Image (cartoon, helix red, strand yellow):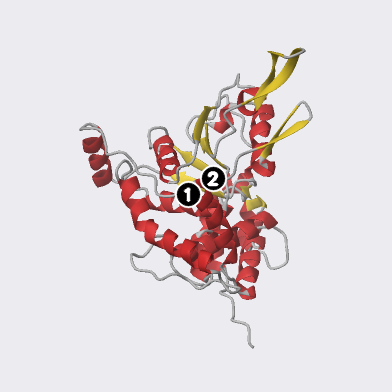
Amino acid sequence: MSIPTETVPPTLEPNPTASDRETAERLLAGRTRIESELAKVIVGQREVIDQILLALLAGGHCLITGAPGLAKTLLVKSIARIFHLKFQRIQFTPDLMPADITGTEILQDAEGGRKLTFVPGPVFANMILADEINRTPPKTQAALLEAMQEHQVTAAGVRHALEEPFFVLATQNPIEMEGTYPLPEAQLDRFMFNVVMDYLPESDEVQVVAQTTAGAPAPIEALFSGDDVLKFHALVRQVPVAEEMVRYAVQLAASSRPHQSGTPDFVNEWVSWGAGTRASQFLILGAKARALLHGRAHVTVEDIQALALPVLRHRVLLNYRAEAEGIRADDVIKKLVAASKPPVPARA
């Protein structure tokens, strides 16, 4: 999912304002600088970086799956610095309580006596890294996931709005599963992408070792602000998309549902539950962000297909037969994309 080096600002609709054009130009001009800043501390992982940036621009949350020591925390923290966002890392453990995330009320002295005062928890930040989210009980997981959905925290019946923009990037360790609390499918569905972070090629790993055992890296420069990110959110939603592209995204997600009309045989054989409507929404929203970063004024089939894996892999639940045959969710999604029919442009 590489981004070309030469692009032109896209034409948005309807009737983009001068401010919209300026925002698009700033994003395109700053794209190369974002990559340069990240290159100071991150080697490789281009596809992972692209997907996290797309989620950031679209206003979605990410689930990052990868083994320990692959620089997940460093990557998220670096992106937060580039966009000048307040960053908080929460280490999820079995004894973590909901109040440890959202905050709690404490009794303080005040004029006329004592009163309860709400003390905000670490969730009151712009970018949250929920490290090893599957190591904490469901009650604590739900406290974070409610904040993700509603962008607010309720304490003692009082609602406290979270500062915008608000993103959650949760990590999972795919190796150690003992003593974990896997996220239910309904909660997984709230994450826009499931980004898989794999081991680096040997040449990149050599560069990482040489770079991290030498002097301290150059500091990362802030290129944007939280207000800029909110403008990017609005800009992404203005990218036009043809009806046939929306229909293609809907059909792609629907084809993952077993025992439906037109479902491929391999889905009926391997899948017990498929993706819902939110998958179609995220396919289109992510495709709009991708089109904008490529300097295009419209969404293409390639945009949708490029995001099929991160959008669908945590929404397709395989059955025991697939597991017995060594079939992965990624294998099913790749076959779905290969079997999908590109949309036919609508006639005027």
> Looking at the picture, does residue 113 appear above or below residue 146?
above
Give me the disc on residue 62.
2
Which one is earlier in the sequence, the residue at label 1 or at label 2?
A: 1
> Looking at the picture, does residue 242 appear above or below residue 95?
below
Give the farthest residue toward the bottom: 348
- Which residue is at the front of the view, 300 or 316? 300
Local secondary structure at mark 1: helix
Give the farthest residue toward the right: 157
**For residue 81, side relative to residue 92 (left or right):** left
Say which quarter of the image contains residue 142. Answer: top right
Q: Are marks 1 and 2 in contact (CB under 8 Å)?
A: yes
Decide if residue 185 is in sight here.
no
Q: Amino acid at mark 2?
A: Cys
Give me the disc on residue 290.
none
Say which quarter of the image contains residue 312. Answer: bottom right
Residue 242, position in %: x, y?
A: 61, 74
- Which residue is at the front of the view, 172 or 271? 172
Local secondary structure at mark 2: strand
Give the farthest residue toward the front: 111
Give me the disc on residue 52.
1
